[in-house]
Amino acid sequence: MTIDEGYIKFSYDWQEKPTPIEINLSEIIAARKNLWQKGLIGVYPDGIGFGNVSIRTSNNQFLISATQIGHIELLQKEDFSLVTEYDFSKNWLRCIGSKKASSESLTHAAIYECAASIECVLHIHSKVYWQRLLGFLPSTDK
């Protein structure tokens, strides 16, 4: 069996250069650190990272934590990538940053598409919360 979780499964155009950040990231960095300290974002023993955060910067753009950084407790601005374009039908996105955008970037894009009022997405992993909230909140199949 091949384990392929936590890895990018879409095509992308990545502009490897400093992430163009025009907003204050202190709140999203603090929230992500809190989730990391609680074990809701991190790295499994097999080395696969899990969980990520993003914040909308404009209508169709957002900053997202980069791929493969679950081991880092306190993120810096270079640990984010700006997603500038995406196309669900092509399973593709364009991002700018020192690191590639998270493997969950298109999921975050889909959530932002649901409502203009969504400003932030926090993606965690917790079996306890999942079991407790199953049947009460929308979720994927078991």
Image (tube, grey):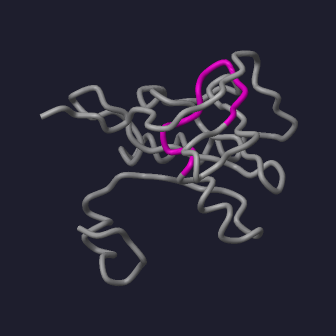
In front of the other: 39 or 54: 54
Compared across the picture, whether 32 is left or right of 61 comes to left
Q: Outermost residue toward the left?
A: 1
Front-most of 133 and 86?
86
Residue 88 part of the magenta segment: no
Task: Count up the numbered dots.
Answer: 0
Q: Is residue 46 left or right of residue 102?
A: left
Check the picture and name the quadrant holding the N terminus. top left
Query: Residue drawn at (69%, 32%), measured in percent from left and top?
Result: 95
Q: Nearer the viewer, residue 37 or 125?
A: 125
Residue 51 found in image quarter: top left
Seen from this angle, which residue lies furthest bottom?
A: 136
Q: Residue furthest front?
A: 90
Q: Residue at x 38, y 71 (%)?
A: 139
Judge whether 59 appears above or below 66 on screen. below
Residue 112: x %, y % from top left? 67, 61
Give left or right: position of 94 versus 68.
Answer: right
* 112 relative position to 102: left or right: right
Residue 134 location (% of width, % of height): 30, 76
* Residue 40 in the image: above or below residue 98: below
Q: Position of residue 115 (x, y in %)?
A: 71, 71
Does 99 lie within the magenta span? yes
Q: Residue, x 68% and y 64% (percent of image)?
A: 113
Q: Quadrant of the C terminus?
A: bottom left
Q: In terms of image quadrants, where is residue 92? A: top right
Q: Is residue 9 above or below residue 20?
A: below
Residue extent of the magenta highlight: 94-106
